[in-house]
Amino acid sequence: MNRRGIIGAIAAAVALAVVPKKTRAAPVKKIRPPGALPRGAFEQACIGCFRCAEVCPTKVIQFPGVFSLDTATPFLELDDRACVLCMKCTQVCPTDALVPLKADVDVVAKEVRMGVPKLNRAACLPWTGHGICRLCYQVCPYPDRAVEVVGPQKAPLFHAEACVGCGLCQEACPETAQAIIIEPLP
Amino acid sequence: MALRSQSFFAPLVKRVLQPFDITLRHGKRYQLVRKLFLSFSVLLTVGLPLWHLRALEVEGAGLAAGTRWSTVSRFLPATPPPFLGAPTSVWVGFFELVDPLEALATALFRGANWNLVWTVLPGVVLVVVFGRFFCGWACPYLPVLATANAARWLLSRLGLPTADVKLPRVTSRVVLVGVLIVGSVLGVQLVPLVYPPAVIGREAFRAVFYGSLGAGSLLVLTAFLFDTFVSRAGFCRSLCPGGAMFSVLGSASPIKVVNDRSKCTDCTVCDVICNLGQSPMTNTLDSGCERCGKCVASCPTKALSFKIVPLGVKRGDS
């Protein structure tokens, strides 16, 4: 390598050492797979290798197909599918953008926060007095912790602090109601 | 230049051999091994998604919605494949391999950790010893490049002009550093968006799993058009950040193409067949050489060969 090359290399190294810590744009809000690093850190660690989506049994892990700078990072599409908390995606991530986790009820309850549940009471069947539904309560992996049912019609009450955001309730909620939506972390 | 005009081979090679990457006479075993390796890599890139789709559908028993590829994948075995991942980050049953460039980008943003170092180490060692071999041996962009070269050949046969802009070698390094800096300013990984092996691996999966293509296919298309109409292998030679990364890492590689000038007839076959603008005929190759060995295989007088040249010794001495 000649002198110009060495100077260039040093300049590049300095730029790379300084720039990443100074400037950062705000990342897009999306529901990330379980075990994901905090927003911002995740987008930098993920190399978009597709392995998480490769092993996902419900194919709920998606890659965006539109033009955005985030095209290479996975997110969860919870509309008609849900995460079954198998934690396989966390175990195959090569860069630890998804921190490896065991598929253990307590570990998952403690470590995983994919999104927060938002209940639209105006659309919920028990809350509007249309019947005893309880579907969300029945599919929830953490009944009585993440969701409890109250009152004579067993209307659901969500506790965001105990909810992992797997989206099973959103998937189970009747088509006519669609009262539950898992929103990205604030 | 006088010799060049006397050459019998140059026009022949230019017209007939260049587009098909045909190798001549010697170095056949090297080419066979390389092409088997390349085929394996390409096969994994497009075949793994199908196999994984099959395994998912068997395991999920209808949980996963089928795509139009399910009709193809049902002929594959139902057991999950022993491999995971795209070409830039593979898990091969007992260990992981991650592309040095993507690992570097991750390490720059997130800090290095030992996990990352171990996964990247085998690749780095291979590149330090064998130079930029990945580009000629494993990159799934190579079939696209071969198609682009064939298109160039077709264009020239039809009498249409094809440009061959030769960007300076430093361009790819500028792209490499630029991608890392811009990515860090934006706070996202840009490398997987502009690095063909990563893009092609991901797009193959996306196509098979969801039946749709993403923005990455646009990059591959752009690179193809660039290689066809603007510059021969221009993307690999002067734009690909991964190629630049491998060039830098492998610049001290001792394994080099050496021209035995006493046997050389200056026929320019090697210079013409080289995709990356190297000149084996004049013994002027740099770290951009991808060790594809096509020049060695095509040399009619066996003047070229791979030799171990220690650092500091000039090529052609000894």
Image (spheres, coloured by chain):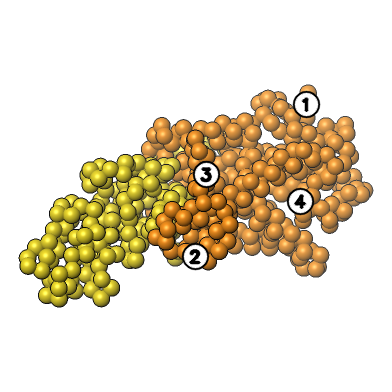
Chain colours: A yellow, B orange
* Whether marks 3 and 1 lie on the same chain: yes
Q: Calculate the distance from the C-alpha at mark 2 to the C-alpha at mark 3.
A: 22 Å
Between B44 and B59, the one nearer to me in the picture: B59
Q: Report the disc number at residue B67.
A: 2
Q: Earlier in the sequence, mark 1 or mark 4?
A: 4
Residue at x 20%, y 52% (from the top left corner): A142
* Whether marks 4 and 2 lie on the same chain: yes
Residue at x 46%, y 52% (from the top left corner): A54
Mark 2 Cα shell of 10 Å, populated few (<14), some (14-19), many (≥20)? some
**Quadrant (top left, top right, bottom left, bottom right) of the C terminus of chain B:** top right
Element marked by disc 3: loop
Callout 4 touching callout 2 (CB < 8 Å): no
Residue ID for mark 1: B317
Q: Is residue A137 visible?
A: yes
Element marked by disc 4: loop
Q: Calculate the distance from the C-alpha at mark 3 to the C-alpha at mark 1.
A: 44 Å
Q: Calculate the distance from the C-alpha at mark 4 to the C-alpha at mark 3.
A: 30 Å
Q: Earlier in the sequence, mark 2 or mark 3?
A: 2
- Mark in the foreground, 4 or 2: 2
- Mark in the foreground, 1 or 4: 4
Q: Is residue A115 visible?
A: no
Q: Report the disc number at residue B83.
A: 3
* Whether marks 4 and 3 lie on the same chain: yes
Element marked by disc 2: loop
**Which chain is indicated by disc 2?**
B
- Mark in the foreground, 4 or 3: 3
In the displayed structure image, the side of residue B80 where residue B146 appears, left or right: right
Residue at x 42%, y 44% (from the top left corner): A92
Q: Calculate the distance from the C-alpha at mark 1 to the C-alpha at mark 2.
A: 59 Å
